[in-house]
Amino acid sequence: MTIALKGIIPVMLTPFTEAKTIDYSGLERLIEWYIANGADALFAVAQSSEMQFLTLDERVELARFVARTAAGRLPVIASGHISESREDQLTELTSIAKTGVDGLVLVTNRLASLDPTRTIFTDNLTWLLDRLPREMTLGLYECPAPFRRLLSDDELAFCADSGRFAILKDVSCDLATVQRRVKLTNGSPLTIVNANAAIAFDAMKSGAPGFTGVFTNFHPDLYKWLLTRHTKHPSLANELSVYLALAAMAEPMGYPKLAKLYHQRLGTFSRIESRAVDFDIRERFWALDALIDKIVEGQESFRAKIAAAG
């Protein structure tokens, strides 16, 4: 049975030790932080998790640990197929499916190269659908690495009509595309969840029932309030949406190590090690700590306004 997937869905970080092995103590604290701050589901083994820099064994154990730690309190979905050949991808996906996660997320750029005829995607997807567990809820992710590959309307309709997909992590970063996709999938189990902070509020108001951008690693509770309470307090919601969009502009400054620095401040992580970002982000991005100070100041200000609004 396809489960419903919507709401605030953080793209999970992977903390590392000084030796750059997975820090499972930090990961456990992170899971609890997400749950305490309004997450409706967790997306493990994604680009934010540095999946391209993890072995298959690490991706499998990461998914298994998150599912086991979440313990049914909220759904856990995971991706983790990074190979070129569909046979290797099937091995990866089948391995992740056995970890106890609630949903398996297929990366669109792994299912097709830059295919001008746009037939390879459907062929590869059909091949995988015939071999993946039919009882497993599936999702789609327009991961921007190694290249962004957006679904065509026909491809999205094919996925919606199959009845096997519960979510598309939309990375179009275009409100009109999100709106069109919401209408196209209406009446199917497939929901469109936007990942771009600049259009997050407008996408929510247009029927995209959630958010799954990278700044769910900073303030998922604020996105949750925006999603669930904006109709009660429209003026405050508009003001908050501007702050969230501007705060997310910090993403190019060494993310995901940037988010790990924030969580080191919170005490979630002991270190900010990253396999994807191998340089000193403080050295490259001047006044980075001061910028995080301002992001935190904004969080505190809006949390106080939300509390006062009731």
Image (cartoon, grey):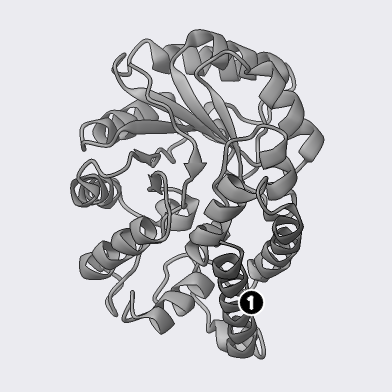
Q: Residue 27: x and y, percent?
A: 28, 63
Q: Position of residue 86 (x, y in %)?
A: 42, 25
**From the image, which quarter does the N terminus lie in?**
top left
Residue 198 pos. (x, y %): 74, 54
x, y percentage for residue 129?
40, 14
Q: In which quarter of the image is residue 172?
A: top right
Q: How many labels does the image show?
A: 1
Q: Nearer the viewer, residue 134 or 307?
A: 307
Residue drawn at (75%, 30%) of the image: 179
Q: Is residue 246 above or below residue 235?
A: below
Q: Which residue lies furthest to the right in this view?
A: 176
> What residue did someone put label 1 on?
298
Q: What element carries label 1?
A: helix
In this rendering, does residue 236 appear at all? yes
Position of 295 with respect to 224 (left or right) is right
Front residue (pair 201, 135): 201
Q: Is residue 34 above or below residue 180?
A: below
Q: Which residue is drawn at 43% across and 54% down?
A: 38
Which residue is at 31% across, 51% downward? 55
236 or 155: nearer the eye?
236
Circle 1 Cα neighbour tier, 10 Å, few/some/many (<14 / 14–19 / ≥20): some
Whether residue 145 is visible to the viewer of this picture, yes or no, is: no
Residue type highlighted by circle 1 = Gly
Q: Classify 34 as above or below 9.
A: below
The correct choice, above or below, for 286 with respect to 257 in the image is: below
Residue drawn at (54%, 12%) of the image: 123
